[in-house]
Image (cartoon, rainbow, N blue to C red):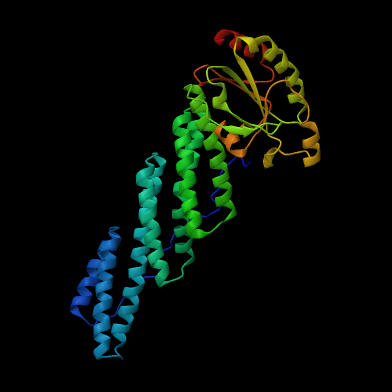
Amino acid sequence: MKNHVKTGLRLFVLAALLSITPVVHSDEAESLEQQASKLSRENQFEQAAELYLKISEICRAGLASDPENTGYKRTLKNADTNYLYNKGQRAYLKMKEAEKAADRSDFDAASAEFEQAASMYLELLKIRDEKAWKGNYEYCLDQPGYRMIRYAERLMKEKKYGPASDYFRKGMEATRNTVKILGERKGFLQNIEYANHFYSVSRFEDQLEKKFPAPPFQLESFSGTPVALSDFSGKIILLEFWALWCPACVEAGAELKKLYSKYNQKGLIVLAVSVDKISDWKKLSDDKIRDRSKTDYGYPVLWGTQQVMEDYGNFEAIPVFILIDRQGNLYKRFFSDEWSLLENEIEGIL
């Protein structure tokens, strides 16, 4: 799992195109050119582009009746060049507006403005295949998802888990939309994987903090029978995530047996969920998994799934213990070095 996010895209800035002084053979075109030039200097790029487009139309009409008129030809070339320049500058300004909106965490506005800028660059690319425009087009598509993921990281560091999970999800969805347009590039796929992982982490942290109902599941036990969390309604449930290859988990198993024997009659249920068949956690061959799973652990032992892993926070170390109260709500999470604290909590809620 990557511990950072990368855009993989470089921000290109469109350089100003060379301005050519036209030789104008129309009073109207000359007047429009002066107005357009003034608007461009004032950064009124959209209005300037519209005037340069009108100049182009005048010149084309003139060339229709006088095809060899060099004045019209030069003016037309200049108008077309300045039309593209002003359109490019307008797209660039829109992109900068989107960046400012993202910097102030207004991602609804930022996403809309990045989308508008991308559309502007796409229209330009239909006219001319310009490297700078292509780079900015891809940048505008990439940025909404990338920036939301980075913002989610910040929220998570501040332990604002609910909003963090929302922005990890939104960033992931935005990046998936980018993939649909630009294809499955490595950086995009890494960002999706990263956001999905920490979406699960932050969502579970929020649920645990607020003592939400424990995510339901039905899993196959080592003995082959289905076991559902709902089978133990009204009980205190100690949920362990572990693996057959994990030495710390083997040590924890002895402590679990003691806890189970001591508190089972008072309503404690132990459910051990093995991660051995989940691809990212699998370290034993199928034969070794089958042989080691024949052990009688004295309490239900289940085969975990990727979905259950995600539902319970995509933890990165095992063993992990999650206590669920009699109402079926998440209560607390513990690690293998917190046995005394875990037992005290069990006694407190039984």
Q: Is residue 74 above or below residue 241?
A: below
Q: Is residue 216 above or below residue 90?
A: above
The reply, left or right, for residue 193 in relation to residue 246 is left
Q: How many marks?
A: 0
Corner quadrant of residue 313:
top right
Viewer-nearest residue: 251 or 19:
251
Residue furthest front as drawn = 225
Query: Is residue 20 visible from the viewing direction of this image?
Result: no
Residue 347 in percent (x, y) is at 60, 8
Viewer-nearest residue: 284 or 117:
284
Q: Is residue 250 above or below residue 89?
A: above
Corner quadrant of residue 323:
top right
Q: Which quarter of the image is occupied by the N terminus?
A: top right
Residue 291 in percent (x, y) is at 81, 34
Residue displayed at 25% across by 63% down: 47
Q: Is residue 150 above or below residue 129?
A: above
Viewer-nearest residue: 297 or 173:
297
Q: Which quarter of the image is occupied by the C terminus?
A: top right
The reply, left or right, for residue 116 in relation to residue 35 is right
Residue displayed at 71% across by 36% down: 276
Residue 150 in percent (x, y) is at 50, 40
Query: Is residue 141 visible from the viewing direction of this image?
Result: yes
Residue 303 in percent (x, y) is at 67, 34
